Amino acid sequence: PAPPIGQGIMVADRFRTHLVGELVDVEPGTSVQVAGWIAFKRVHKRVAFIGLRDRSGTVQVVCAPPEVLEVPRESCVTVSGVVRERPGPDVTRSGLGLIEVAEGRVELLSPAATLPIGIEHPDGDREARWRWRYLDMRGGDARRRLLLRAQLPSVLRRFMQEQGFAELETPYLAHPSSGGAREFQVVSTSDPARRYALPQSSQVYR
């Protein structure tokens, strides 16, 4: 079976060595490079914490304050650091997992402007969320639904193939239009007086 999103995926580019979801299987003390968006940011005098989110999850990054002081939330960054176990009694309740990236060195790839909608904590403006859908898809619920929708057809196809079925695609049939190009007429097998047509363009459904 195919691996879950963020696990078992080979990643090889100049921005990352691992996806965030793969860090749980990395030996503590290993140097890694991850990339994504800044989900949250907490800057103190001596240390700063950011949440780095990609399509596989979110991980906490510990770095020096100057690394992220002027970097807005939801900016696209790449982070180099060392994987280590997260200290503290609340690690199981934070939703960030049991590991973090320490000694983080942050490189800004693309700064974010002021966001028109909330991402981690959705607001009630539904119209705004539809208008800025590409931002809304970064959030938890929208991202999970889209990933599930993308995975479901392949899971169903794989199951049916294992059962010995073959997938056949039949053409779409629609009501004949009143004008336009010549249509290919299809006679109904149950009612010879009824006619269908192969759609010629997407305008048929408008």
Image (cartoon, rainbow, N blue to C red):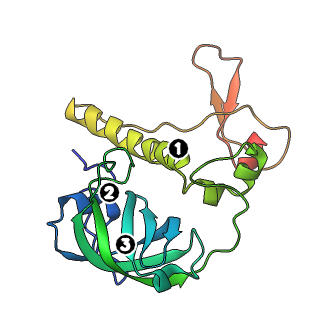
The front one of 112 and 149 is: 112
The label on residue 62 is 3
Q: Judge whether 127 appears above or below 107 on screen.
A: above
Q: Position of residue 108 (x, y in %)?
A: 50, 84
Q: Judge whether 151 appears above or below 39 on screen.
A: above
Q: Position of residue 94 (x, y in %)?
A: 39, 49
Does 140 sit left or right of 195 as displayed? Answer: left
Mark 2 lies on residue:
6
Label 3: how many Cα within 10 Å (few below 14, some 14–19, many 20+): many
Numbered-mark total: 3
The label on residue 158 is none
- The residue lying at 36 percent from left, 44 percent from top is 93
Mark sitting earlier along the chain (2/3): 2
Q: CA distance from mark 3 to mark 1?
A: 26 Å
Mark sitting earlier along the chain (3/1): 3
Does 106 sit left or right of 27 as displayed? Answer: right
User: Which quarter of the picture shows residue 195?
Assistant: top right
